[in-house]
Image (spheres, helix red, strand yellow):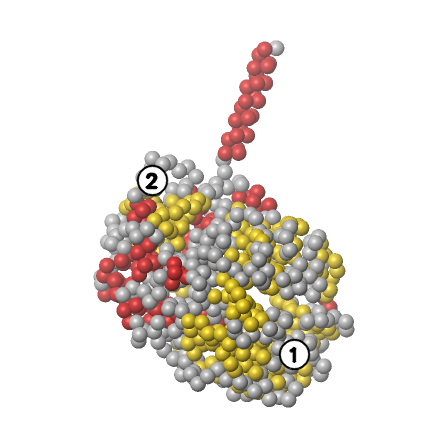
Amino acid sequence: MHIRLRTNLLAAVLLCFAFVAQAQQKKDITLEDIYQNGTFRAKSVYGVNWMNDGRYYSSQVADEKNKVYDIVKYDVTTGQPVSTIIEGENLVPQGSNQPIQYDGYTFSSDEQKVLFSTETEQIYRRSSKAEFYIYDIASKKLTKLSDGGKQMYATFSPDAKRVAFARENNMFVTDLSNMQETQITTDGKFNSIIHGYADWVYEEEFSFAQGFHWSPDGKKIAFYTFDETNVPEFNMQMWGELYPQDNKFKYPKAGEANSKVTVSVYDVNNGKTVKMDTGKEDDIYIPRIKWTNDANLLSIQKMNRLQNTLEILHANATTGKADVVLKETDKAYIDVTDDLTYLKDGKHFIHSSEVEGFNHLYLYRMNGKLVRQITNGNWEVSQFVGYDEKNDRLYYMSTEVSPLERHLYSISSKGKSKKRLTDKAGTHRVNMSNDFTYYLDYYSAANQVPTVSLHTAKDGKLIKVLEDNATLKNKLAQYDIAKQEFFQMKTADGTQLNGWMIKPNDFDPNKKYPVLMFVYGGPGSQTVTNSWGGTNYLWYQVLADKGMIVVSVDNRGTGARGAEFKKSTYANLGKYEIEDQIEAAKWLGNQSYVDKNRIGIWGHSFGGYMTLLGLTKGDGVFRAGISVAPVTSWRFYDTIYTERFLKTPQENAAGYDDNSPLHFADQLQGDLLLIHGTGDDNVHFQNAVAMQDALISANKQFESFYYPNRNHGVGGGVTSIHRFKMMTNFLERKLINPTEVNQ
C-alpha cells in the first residue's frame, strides 16, 4: 500500500516536472520565421470603406467558389455581413467571358456606381496607373473607362455624372451618360509638362501623387501643372537585359532648378480653363490645393523655396483672382499637413500651426482673422481627424499623455469640454466614419500585438473587437521573446532623450554584453514609441537570443516634443543628431552590463547616414556599423526635403559639407557594411558609390553589397531574408563573437 502510494506520488512529481520542462522549453525565432514563412504576420481590418450611412462599411471579400472578390456590406455594430452589394462573377466586361480581377474600388457619392482598378502598375512610392472599369449596380453593367491606355487616379465627380483622370501627362474627363471622353489638356509631354499628377519630388516630399480635385458641385476640376523642362535629369540604369536599360526622370537635387508649378481650373460645362493667380514669383511650392465649401472658391497653399513662409490663398475659380488670407513665417521651416479644414457654414476654417511652439488647432474666419486657439498645451496635435459640426466636436490625435504615445481626443470649437477617448497606454490610429458616429481603433503597444476595435465616437465606448490577433499572441507565447523596456538618459548639456532597450532573456547583470544601436534620427521622426515594432522587433529577438542588447534612442531633431526640440538641428543637419547618438553610446558603455568595446550602430536611409557619421566622427565609440541606403552628401538629395532643413547649398555650403561622411572617410574607425539598391530612385546609388570611392581613397577597408534594381526599401522576393541573413552574420562576426582586429 505504501509502496504503491510512493510510486504513484513519484510518477506524479516526474510528470509535473515534465510539464514544467516542456512549458519552459520555448522555441527560438528564426530569420525564416520573420522574412520567409510569415510566421508572425499580424492580421488587421483592411479595405474599410465607410458608406453614407455611418453604420455600414463595405469591404472586398474572397469568393473561393468562383475565385473572385465580392463587395460585401457590413454592419459596424456587429461586424457581421449584411448583404453582398456586388457579386464578383458579375464583373464581366463586354466582349469577355471572364470577370475582371480588381485590386481596388471606389463608390460614387450616391453609391450607385463603382470604379474598379485592374492591372495596376506601380511607378514610384505613391504613383501608379491602371485600367479602370465603371460598374452600374442597378443594371449590373460593367464598362471600361477608356481604350486610350492605362489611366491614373480615376475619380468620380461629387454629382456622380463624370470621371476625371490623367494619362501620359494630360488630363481627361469622361461623361458617364454617354461615355464621351474629353481631353482637357493637350501639351503634356514626358519629362517636360505634367498635368494632373505630381512630379517626382512633390510625390516623395509633399506626399501626394494625384494632382487634381473636383469642385463640390462637380462642375469644375482644379489641377496642377508641372513644367519640369529645366529640372536636371537623373539616369538610373536597370540591369538584366543584354544591354542595361536607361531609366531617366527629372530629379531636382539640392540647389538645382525645380518644376515651375501652376494651378488651373477647368469648367466642364463651357470647356474653358482658367489659370489661378499665385503671384509673379515662380520659384515657389504649392504643396496643397483643396476646394472650400464654396464651389467657386479654391484654397491654395503656397510656400517660398526655403519653406519658412506659408500663405493660404483663396482663389476665384472663374476669374483666377486670388487673395492671401493667412500668412505664417518661421525662423526655421514650416511643416505641411492635411489639417486645413473648411467648415460647412462657409464662414470659418480650421488650421494647425506650431506658431506657439507646439502644433495646435486654430479657428479662423474666412478672411483669415483669428477667432481663437482651440487646443493648447506643451504637447502636439499629431493629426486633425475631423470636425463634427452637427455636435460641435473636433477630433484629433495628440501626444498629451506622452511623446511615445498617440491618443484620440475630442473638444468643442470653443476649446471646451475636452475628452480623451482612448484609454489603453500605447499608440492608437483611428479610421473615423464619415458621419462621426463610429471609429475603428488600430491599437498596439510595446510587447503587445496589434488589435482593431470598433467604438462610438461621442464617448469612445467599445462596441466590438474586430481583430484581436489572438492566434499571433498565442503563437508568440511559444517563443523566447525578450521584453522591450523604455528608459531615459541625459546628455552633457542636460537634454533628456528617450530610448528603449531589449535585453537577452537570460540576461545576467554581472556579464558584459555587446550592444547594437538602431537609429533613424531624421527631422520629426521617432523610433522610440510605445507601439508594436513589427519585423524589426522580431529581428531584434533573434539578436537578443544570440546574446546581444539592442537599443534605440531618439536624438535632438526628432518629433513629438515641440518645435524647439525638432528644429534645433536646422541648418546643421547631422551635427547634433550624431552628437546625441555618440553620447548615448558612451552612456551605454558606462553601464555595468555593457561591453563598451563592442557597441555597434545600424540604420536605413537617414539612419544609414547617421551610421556613417557614427563610424567616421565617433572617435572609435562604435566598433561596427551597418549602413543601408544612406545619404552620404545632402548635395545628392532632393530640393524639397534637403533645403527645408539646410537651406540651399549656395546659401549654406558648410551645413552640407561639415556633416557629410564623405569628408571624414579618413577618420573611419570600426567595421563597416555598406548596403544599397542600384534601382533606388529616392536616395540614389550614387551616394554609396561616392562613399566607397572616398573610403578607398583614404585606404580604409570595409565591406559592401549592392542589390541590383532594388529600390529604396531594398526588398522584394527573397531580398529581405537575404539582406538580414547577411546583416546578422556581420554582427556575429564583428560584435557578438568578434575574431578580427579593427582596421
Q: Amino acid at mark 2?
A: Tyr
Q: Mark 2 sits on what residue?
A: 593
Name the residue: 34% across, 35% down: 510
User: On residue 532, which mark appears?
Assistant: none
Query: How would you rate the neighbour count of disc 2 (Cα within 10 Å): few for under 14, some for 14-19, many for 20 or more?
Result: some
* Label 1 residue SS: loop
Marks 2, 1: nearer the viewer = 1
Query: How would you rate the neighbour count of disc 1 (Cα within 10 Å): few for under 14, some for 14-19, many for 20 or more?
Result: some
Q: Quadrant of residue 629?
A: bottom left
- From the image, which quarter does the N terminus lie in? top right
Image height of 222 relative to 716, above or below: below
Percent position (x, y) of residue 42?
A: 56, 52
Percent position (x, y) of residue 64?
A: 69, 58
For the residues labelled 2 and 1, the Cα–Cα distance comes to 66 Å
- From the image, which quarter does the C terminus lie in? bottom left
Q: Amino acid at mark 1?
A: Gly
Farthest residue toward the top?
A: 1
Name the residue: 30% across, 45% down: 589
Residue 641 appearing in the image:
no
Position of residue 275 in the picture relative to residue 515 (left or right): right
Percent position (x, y) of residue 390?
A: 66, 64
Q: Quadrant of residue 485?
A: top left
* Label 2 residue SS: loop
User: On residue 218, which mark appears?
Assistant: 1
Percent position (x, y) of residue 616?
A: 27, 58
Question: Which residue is at the front of the view, 670 or 341?
Answer: 341
The answer to whether marks 2 and 1 mark residues whose Cβ atoms lie closer than 8 Å is: no
Question: Which residue is at the front of the view, 157 or 241?
Answer: 157
